[in-house]
């Protein structure tokens, strides 16, 4: 069975070649928003789940094929997939071997729950980029949104991420998945924990792809409000047009894209890139709306530290 998948297009990583190290839904959590369905093996036991020799041989074969033009190029090699990668014992061997085999950065996509263990932190030190998640700051929210293994506590998860930051010199991009009615009201506390962790980036997401359970996303307008709560964060959610125009409460009542843009800018100045992500419109299309709104005096431009923002004038 192949352990490689993709390359798949990723907004954050460009083209990402995935490496799946775990059996399907072997995880430390059972998140309400998981797109893969319920966790079938909820565990904290780290084992050698795959043969490193087999995985590395597949990576080398793929690297050769890319070099010879028989396979598609990729930007990142990403340890991710259908289970939690930190549950594989011996990640260091795979990360080191992968870095020798490919001339691309190696990223680790993880729920970040096991970094309180020293051996786990040691095994990931050679990764170029770690993308852990943090969706809660209190035990009650951790229980409701992540439904963790009973022996995991949110305090040790946060402490583990703080320690990782102290020992790991690569980039850490912390992802926060916001789920309406589950953890959105806890955002200020999660933001406080994120500040303690001190990642290179904080990336806010919401459940825009259909999860297995009936949970609701945070709307684009609320998401812009979240940028005020999480200082220096960015939104990485990618809404579909249907959702932003018809699915949300705000957009019910046939609000057009222009009205949605004004609502978003009334909360906070946004860049073109942020507006494109929040409205699910192409940048060129957004520009057309911005021109009309600007000419009508409904929005204006603002340059801050060399970055161009659009804002509602009476904000
Ligand atoms: S951590 Fe990831 S794989 Fe595990 S349950 Fe949550 S979303 Fe699914």
Image (cartoon, helix red, strand yellow):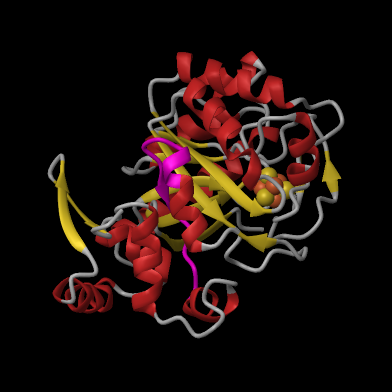
Locate the N terminus and report the quarter of the image it occupies. bottom right
Work out whether residue 147 can be spotted. Answer: yes
Give residue 103's position: percent from left, percent from top.
31, 42
Q: Is residue 121 above or below residue 143?
A: above
Residue lying at 64% horizontally and 43% vertically, measured from the top left: 185
Q: Is residue 73 above or below residue 176?
A: below
Whether residue 87 sits left or right of residue 313 in the image: it is right
Residue lying at 79% horizontally and 27% vertically, measured from the top left: 152
Give residue 224's position: percent from left, percent from top.
43, 53
Residue lying at 63% horizontally and 14% vertically, measured from the top left: 118
User: Which image quadrant is residue 36 in?
Assistant: bottom right
* Most frequent secondary structure within the magenta stretch: loop
140 or 12, which lies in front?
140
Give residue 297's position: percent from left, percent from top.
18, 70
Residue lying at 85% horizontally and 51% vertically, measured from the top left: 40
Whether residue 220 sits left or right of residue 24 in the image: it is left
Tally the marks. Answer: 0
In magenta segment, residue 191:
no
Residue located farthest toward the front when viewing the structure as drawn:
314
Whether residue 15 sits left or right of residue 52 in the image: it is left
User: Which image quadrant is residue 207 in?
Assistant: bottom right
Where are the magenta residues, as a range? 227-240
263 or 190, which lies in front?
263
Give residue 16's position: percent from left, percent from top.
43, 55
73 or 275, which lies in front?
275
In magenta segment, residue 230:
yes
Q: Is residue 233 above or below residue 310?
A: above
Work out whether residue 46 can be spotted. Answer: no
């Amino acid at each position: 069975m192949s352990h490689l998948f993709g390359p798949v297009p990723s907004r954050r990583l460009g083209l990402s070649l995935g490496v799946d190290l775990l059996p399907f839904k072997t995880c430390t959590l059972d998140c309400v928003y998981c797109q893969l369905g319920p966790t079938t093996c909820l565990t904290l036991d780290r084992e050698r789940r795959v043969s490193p020799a087999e995985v590395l041989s597949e990576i080398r074969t793929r690297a050769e094929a890319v070099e010879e033009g028989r396979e598609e190029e990729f930007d990142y090699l990403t340890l991710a997939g259908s289970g939690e990668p930190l549950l594989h014992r011996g990640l260091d061997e795979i990360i080191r071997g992968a870095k020798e085999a490919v001339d691309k950065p190696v990223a680790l996509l993880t729920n970040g729950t096991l970094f309180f263990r020293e051996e786990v932190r040691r095994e990931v030190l050679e990764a170029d980029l770690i993308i852990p998640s943090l969706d809660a700051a209190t035990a009650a929210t951790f229980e409701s949104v992540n439904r963790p293994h009973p022996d995991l506590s949110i305090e040790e998860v946060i402490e583990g991420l703080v320690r990782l930051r102290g020992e790991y010199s690569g980039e850490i991009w912390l992802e926060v998945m916001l789920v309406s009615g589950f953890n959105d009201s806890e955002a200020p506390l999660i933001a406080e924990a994120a500040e303690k962790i001190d990642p290179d980036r904080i990336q806010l997401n919401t459940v825009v792809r259909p999860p297995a359970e009936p949970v609701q996303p945070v709307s684009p307008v609320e998401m812009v409000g979240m940028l005020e709560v999480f200082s220096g964060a960015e939104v990485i959610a990618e809404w579909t047009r249907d959702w932003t125009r018809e699915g949300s409460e705000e957009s019910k009542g046939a609000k057009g894209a222009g009205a949605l843009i004004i609502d978003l800018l009334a909360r906070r100045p946004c860049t073109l890139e942020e507006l494109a992500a929040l409205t699910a419109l192409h940048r060129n299309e957004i520009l057309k709306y911005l021109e009309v709104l600007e000419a009508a005096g409904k929005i204006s431009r603002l340059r801050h530290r060399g970055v161009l923002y659009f804002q509602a004038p009476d904000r």
